[in-house]
Amino acid sequence: MSIPAPAAADRAALLLGWREWAALPDLGLTLIKAKVDTGARTSTLHAFYVDPFDRCGVPWARFGVHPLRGRTDVVVHAEAPVIDRRQVSDSGGHREQRYVILTRLTLGGATWPIELGLSNRETMLFRMLLGRTAFAGRALVDPGRSFLTGRQSRPARHYGRD
């Protein structure tokens, strides 16, 4: 799966706030709160463990996600092909080697492929960081607003934990 450029008519059709509810359907993540970060180039998903393995000679990763902050009882286990391993600097300047996967993002009724680094974000406020390359040419960001694609009440309900 490659990341196609959006058609001219689709460019900037989506308006995002600085935080949004998203889904990663290929990974079984029906709802996850993402920080939309135009200062970050790459996107990152919280993975509290990452186990690399080979499937038919192709590198894959098996990983676990706590999609809801403060709810370690809500766990989603997923697998995806690894497209790269990259050195990434976090906001504090710490460098880390991360597995990168390609998966589909659903946001505001639209779905498209994005690259996603896997990293432990347990101490962070958001389980997902949506970097600018994930929405470049597809959305505009209003940094003074939140949840422009829809609010969610009782998100644990999406994981049968309400």
Image: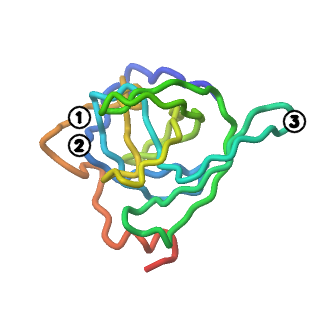
Q: Is residue 102 left or right of residue 150?
A: right
Q: Which mark is residue 18?
A: 2
Tell me which numbered mark, 2 or 1, is placed earlier along the sequence: 2
Separation of residues labelled 3 and 1 (CA atoms): 41 Å
The answer to whether the residue labelled 2 contacts the one labelled 3, judged by CB atoms less than 8 Å apart, is no
Place of residue 94 in the rendered image (x, y in percent of width and height, measured from the top left): 38, 30
Place of residue 135 in the rendered image (x, y in percent of width and height, measured from the top left): 38, 31
The answer to whether the residue labelled 2 contacts the one labelled 1, judged by CB atoms less than 8 Å apart, is yes
Residue type, numbered disc 3: Cys
- Which residue is nearer to you in this view: 83 or 85? 85
- Which residue is nearer to you in this view: 37 or 88? 88
For discs 2 and 3, the disc positioned in front in the rendered view: 3
Q: Is residue 5 left or right of residue 41?
A: right
Q: Is residue 143 left or right of residue 46?
A: left
**Residue position marked by numbered label 1 in the rendering:** 141
Q: Secondary structure at mark 2?
A: loop
Outermost residue toward the front in this view: 94
Quadrant of the image containing the N terminus: top right
Q: Which mark is residue 56?
A: 3
Q: Secondary structure at mark 1?
A: strand
Identity of the residue drawn at 37% across and 62% down: 69
- Which residue is nearer to you in this view: 84 or 122? 122
Q: Secondary structure at mark 3?
A: loop
The answer to whether the residue labelled 3 contacts the one labelled 1, judged by CB atoms less than 8 Å apart, is no
Q: Residues within 10 Å of mark 1 (few under 14, many from 20)?
A: many
Tell me which numbered mark, 3 or 1, is placed earlier along the sequence: 3
Q: Which mark is residue 17?
A: none
Place of residue 142 in the rendered image (x, y in percent of width and height, measured from the top left): 18, 37
Residue type, numbered disc 2: Trp
Residue type, numbered disc 1: Val
For discs 3 and 1, the disc positioned in front in the rendered view: 3
